[in-house]
Structure formats: structure tokens, C-alpha cells
Image: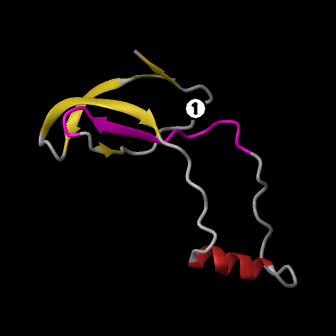
Amino acid sequence: MNIPKTVNMYCAWCKKHNAHGIFVSKKRQKRTLSKGQRRFKRKMEGYGSFPKPMPTGKKPTQRQDLRFKCEECKKSNTRSKMPRVKKFELTE
């Protein structure tokens, strides 16, 4: 999937349409000390009463997390998630 590096779209901070640069943000790591992760870890211990976690292998297609950065005010925002694509490219 080819997407242009700059797109003209509405900026909520500038209150007008202007150019936005697109970049892919890095994937975040799990918070191992969060309440949900601690609860999950506690349930996984013991006699196997909780289902096994999903295998850690990657899916064949990935979802890209795109960020749109305003050229004027330099604030970035996101749009709804992209569909899964095998090949992703930012073009001129």
C-alpha cells in the first residue's frame, strides 16, 4: 500500500486545513506492572484453570500505526487504524 508522505488535512489546534507529514510510530511495550498484567500473571500460575496465552509469533500482515504531524504547529494526531497490509510504503 502506497501512502504519500504529506497530506492536506484539518488540524484541530490550528482550526484550518494545512499540510501534515505522516510517520509511523514505534510499537509500545507491555506495561508488566499494570493491574491487568499482574492479574493475568497470577491467573496463569497454579493448576492451569486459565487458557494458555496466544503464541508469540507474528501475524503475516501487520497494522501500521500512522501519526499525522501538522507542518505549522508541529502537533501530531492519529486517525482510525489502518487495515492490515503486507507491504507498506511512504511515497513522495
* Figure quadrant of the C terminus: top left
Region rendered in magenta:
58-73
The x and y percentages for residue 40 are: 69, 76
Image: 67 above or below 42: above
Tell which residue pokes out farthest to the top in this image.
92
- Amino acid carrying mark 1 in the image: Val
> Is 78 within the magenta?
no
Residue under the point 59% across and 66% down = 31
> Is 59 within the magenta?
yes
Tell which residue pokes out farthest to the bottom in this image.
46
Residue under the point 64% across and 69% down = 32
Residue under the point 70% across and 42% down = 59
**Toward which corner of the image does residue 16 lie, by quadrant?**
top left
From the viewer's perspective, tell me whether residue 87 is left or right of residue 14: right
The x and y percentages for residue 54 are: 75, 59
The x and y percentages for residue 33 are: 61, 74
What residue is pinned by disc 1? Answer: 85
Q: How crowded is mark 1: few (under 14 residues within 10 Å), some or many (20 or more)?
A: few
